[in-house]
Image (cartoon, grey):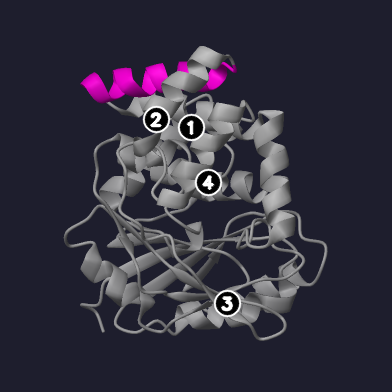
Amino acid sequence: MPDRPLVVVLLATHDGADFLREQVDSILAQQGVDVRIVVSDDGSTDATPALLDELAADPRILQLPPGAYGSAHANFLRLIRDAPVDGAAAIAFSDQDDVWNPGRLAAQLEQLRTADAVSANVIAVYDDDRRVLLDKAQPQRSLDFVLESAGPGCTFVLSPAAFDLVRHVVRTDPEADAAPIHDWLVYAIVRAAGMRWHIDPAPVIDYRQHAANDTGANLGWSQARTRLRRMRSGGFRREAAVVARIASRVAEGEHRARLTALAALLERGDARARLALLRGIGSLRRRGSERIALAGMLLLGVW
């Protein structure tokens, strides 16, 4: 139907042959919209390149020249920089191993009528058939984007204006490549600019969990230990400082000054910096339990 809105879907792949066809089929089967999938492959050594060549017989699928990027973050930044998005009513991000609900994009396009970007909850699906809701839809805080994303990037849908801003920052900011992960960076750019972001509590995809996940659901004791080690090493703090600096260059006026000051605090590890962060804890995380946990780590000097 010629009057259906076009959504350009940015799909990053790397050794994803086991699940890629089901992912692509669920995108092409989206109801009420037209889709164009733009694929960037990051040096796959399994059957992914051959499968992509087969899938690209469908004119709705465009392959960018393959490269070697070394991470999902770098591969998605390549897509943000280079993917053709002409004529798109919205731009979405896709992993290579999920299954999208058929009405997902149509529902999120409706939400874009009152927002500049949207994301949603997901159902984590495990090999033993467990299905777990990942709830990221707590009320947003003024600076939550400095410490967290809006949920899995595979649920993100951006208006053309929001995507143009993200593309400009990714192409021009010298620290974009050093940011920790694309979804956190995208959320920070849009929010720092004062644009509206809606997080839908309704899950929109089956978020497949397996040994080769680049990030995954971050549930369980093993993931908790990994996060704690990252906190104690200062790695997470340094990543947040990078995000805060990039966000400060997007923001204006008082918001820019606040982000610049926050970035400086995150770069330090002394007691005064921790106390200053503790005073602003209410603005830094959406979930109450995570604000309490972060406050405890600041008081103990763990973070």
User: Disc 1, disc 3: CB below 8 Å?
Assistant: no
**Which amino acid lies under the numbered mark 1 shown in the image of this protein?**
Val
Distance from the alpha carbon under mark 4 to that under mark 1 = 11 Å
For marks 2 and 4 on the same chain, the one whose residue lies earlier in the sequence: 4
Q: Using a 10 Å C-alpha cutoff, classify the residue at mark 4 as few (fewer than 14 neighbours), some (14 to 19) or many (20 or more).
A: many
Distance from the alpha carbon under mark 4 to that under mark 3 = 20 Å
Q: Residue beneath label 2, please?
A: 247
Outermost residue toward the right?
Answer: 45
In the depicted structure, whether residue 270 falls above or below residue 156: above
For marks 3 and 2 on the same chain, the one whose residue lies earlier in the sequence: 3
Q: Where is residue 278 in the image (x, y as percent from the top left)?
A: 44, 28
Distance from the alpha carbon under mark 3 to that under mark 2 = 32 Å
Q: Which mark is residue 23?
A: 3
Viewer-nearest residue: 7 or 186? 186
**Which amino acid lies under the numbered mark 3 shown in the image of this protein?**
Gln
In the depicted structure, whether residue 220 falls above or below residue 193: below
Q: In the rendered view, does 275 fall on the left or right side of 107?
A: right
**Which amino acid lies under the numbered mark 2 shown in the image of this protein?**
Ala
Q: In the rendered view, does 84 fall on the left or right side of 160?
A: right
| Callout in the foreground (1, 3) | 1
User: Disc 2, disc 1: CB below 8 Å?
Assistant: yes
Q: Quadrant of residue 118?
A: bottom left
Q: Where is residue 48 in the image (x, y as percent from the top left)?
A: 73, 69
Q: Which residue is drawn at 28% across and 35% down?
A: 193
| Callout in the foreground (3, 2) | 2
Q: Residue beneath label 1, please?
A: 243
Q: Where is residue 151 in the image (x, y as percent from the top left)?
A: 46, 57
Q: Residue beneath label 4, please?
A: 182
Distance from the alpha carbon under mark 2 to that under mark 1 = 6 Å
